C-alpha cells in the first residue's frame, strides 16, 4: 500500500522537473520493463520529457510491450544513456533498491545529480534516493506504482495499454497470482486495471502463450537431462551449462520459468535453477510455504530477494556450485521441517 505522505516529496520533485530518467535493473523482467513504460506514459501525459534506461535488453517475451523499442540500453548505447542520466532533474529507480543492481550502468548512475525517487518491493533498500515508496510485502513494483500514480492524481491517464503493462508485472512477479505476496489489494488493483480496459488474456498469451522451438527444446532438455529431484529432501535442482545453452541457440529470457518447472514436481518445496553466464553462475531460488529462499540465497550465494523467490550468484564453476548445493540438501530439508513445525 502507498502512504499519501510518501508522495508529498514525489510531487514536489516532479513539479519542478523537466527531464526525467526512469531506470530499472539488469536482466530486466516484466515488472521492471512494464513499470518503466507505464510510468513513462503517465509522466509524458503530464508534459514531462522522459527517457527509459536499462542496463541491458529485456527478453523476447516482452517484445510486445508498447514503447519497449524506445528504451535506451546502456550496453548498446552508453553515450546516450549517460547523457540522459546526467540531464535528468529526477531519476526513478523502479523494481530495485541498490545501485549495484544496475551492473555496468551503476557508475554512470552514481554520478547523476538529479533527485532519485524509488518505487520498489525488495528487502533492504539502500538510502541513495531522496524519497521512496517501498513495501517489501507488496506483490510487485507494478502494484505499488499503481498506488503512486493514483496518489498523484493520475488515475485517468492509465489507459488499457498502461494497464496491460502494469498487469504484466503483477502477473509474472506473483507466478500468475499464486505466491503468498498476493493480497486482496493486489486483486483490487487488477479490478481497477480491468475497469480501464485491460485485456488480461492477451497479456498472458503474449508472455506465456507462444515460444520459439529453441526455447521449448531447451526446457525439454533441461527437464530430461539436467533436473535432479531429491524427494527425501523435498528439493529439486536444474542447471544448464554454457554449452547446453549454445546448443539451443540461447537468447535472453529462454530460461525464464525453468525454476518453476522444478518447483512444480510433486512433493518439491524448494527449487534451485543455476546457469553458467559469462563471468559467473547465476541462480534462481523458489519455495512454497514457510522456507525462506531469501535467507538461504543470502547465506550461501551472496543473494537476496523475496521469501518465496530469490536470486544469487557465484564465481565458482557450475560443477562446484552444483556440488555445493547437493551438500546443502540436509540443511534445506531441516529448514523446511523447522519452518513447518507448529510455532509457539
Ligand atoms: Mn518486481
Image: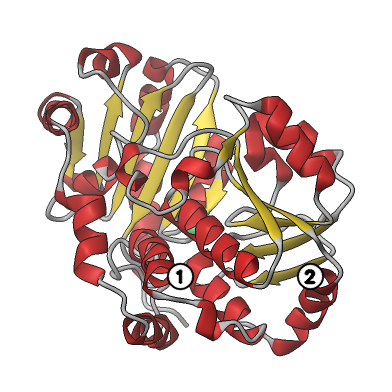
Residue 43 position, x and y percent, is 64, 67
* Vertical order, 63 against 185 (above or below): above
Q: Which residue of the protein is positioned furthest toward the right in this rendering?
A: 113
Quick one: quadrant of the N terminus?
A: bottom right
Which of the 4 image quadrants contains residue 81? top right
Q: Which residue is mark 2?
A: 14
Colouring scheme, one of rainbow, by chain, secondary structure, one colour: secondary structure
* Vertical order, 289 against 91 (above or below): below
Closest to the observer, 224 or 84: 84
Reading the chain from its start, which is encountered first: label 2 or label 1? 2
In percent of the image, x 74 and y 42: which residue is there? 84
Q: Is residue 180 left or right of residue 109?
A: left
Label 1 crowding class (10 Å Cα cut-off): few <14, some 14-19, many 20+?
A: many
In percent of the image, x 47 and y 83: which residue is there? 344
In percent of the image, x 28 and y 14: which residue is there? 246
Q: Is residue 28 left or right of residue 290?
A: right
Residue 292 position, x and y percent, is 45, 58
Q: Is residue 166 left or right of residue 88?
A: left
Mark number for residue 139? 1
Amino acid at each position: 500500500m502507498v502512504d499519501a505522505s510518501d508522495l508529498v516529496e514525489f510531487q514536489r520533485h516532479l513539479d519542478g522537473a523537466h527531464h526525467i530518467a526512469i531506470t530499472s535493473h539488469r536482466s530486466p523482467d516484466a515488472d521492471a520493463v512494464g513499470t518503466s513504460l507505464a510510468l513513462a506514459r503517465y509522466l509524458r501525459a503530464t508534459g514531462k520529457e522522459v527517457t527509459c534506461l536499462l542496463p541491458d535488453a529485456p527478453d523476447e517475451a516482452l517484445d510486445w510491450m508498447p514503447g519497449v523499442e524506445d528504451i535506451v540500453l546502456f550496453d548498446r548505447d552508453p553515450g546516450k544513456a549517460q547523457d540522459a542520466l546526467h540531464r535528468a532533474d529526477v531519476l526513478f529507480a523502479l523494481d530495485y533498491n541498490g545501485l549495484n543492481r544496475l551492473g555496468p550502468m551503476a557508475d554512470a548512475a552514481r554520478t547523476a545529480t538529479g533527485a532519485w525517487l524509488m518505487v520498489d518491493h525488495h528487502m533492504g533498500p539502500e538510502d541513495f534516493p531522496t524519497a521512496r515508496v517501498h513495501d517489501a510485502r507488496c506483490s510487485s513494483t507494478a502494484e505499488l506504482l499503481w498506488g503512486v500514480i493514483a496518489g498523484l492524481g493520475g488515475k485517468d491517464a492509465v489507459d488499457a495499454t498502461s494497464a496491460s503493462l502494469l498487469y504484466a508485472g503483477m502477473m509474472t512477479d506473483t507466478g500468475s497470482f499464486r505466491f503468498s505476496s498476493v493480497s486482496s489489494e493486489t486483486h483490487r488493483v487488477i479490478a481497477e486495471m480491468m475497469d480501464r480496459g485491460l485485456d488480461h488474456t492477451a497479456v498472458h498469451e503474449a508472455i506465456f502463450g507462444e515460444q520459439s522451438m529453441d526455447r521449448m527444446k531447451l526446457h525439454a532438455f533441461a527437464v530430461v537431462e539436467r533436473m535432479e529431484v531429491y524427494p527425501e529432501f523435498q528439493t529439486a535442482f536444474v542447471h544448464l551449462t554454457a554449452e547446453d545453452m549454445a546448443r539451443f541457440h540461447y537468447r535472453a529470457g529462454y530460461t525464464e520459468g525453468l525454476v518453476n518447472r522444478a518447483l512444480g514436481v510433486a512433493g518439491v518445496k524448494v527449487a534451485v535453477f543455476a546457469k553458467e553466464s559469462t563471468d559467473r553462475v547465476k541462480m534462481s531460488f523458489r519455495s512454497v510455504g514457510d522456507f525462506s529462499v531469501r535467507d538461504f540465497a543470502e547465506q550461501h550465494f551472496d543473494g537476496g530477494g523475496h521469501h518465496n523467490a530469490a536470486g544469487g550468484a557465484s564465481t565458482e564453476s557450475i560443477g562446484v556450485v552444483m556440488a555445493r548445493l547437493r551438500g546443502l540438501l540436509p540443511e534445506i530439508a531441516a529448514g523446511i521441517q523447522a519452518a513447518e513445525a507448529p510455532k509457539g
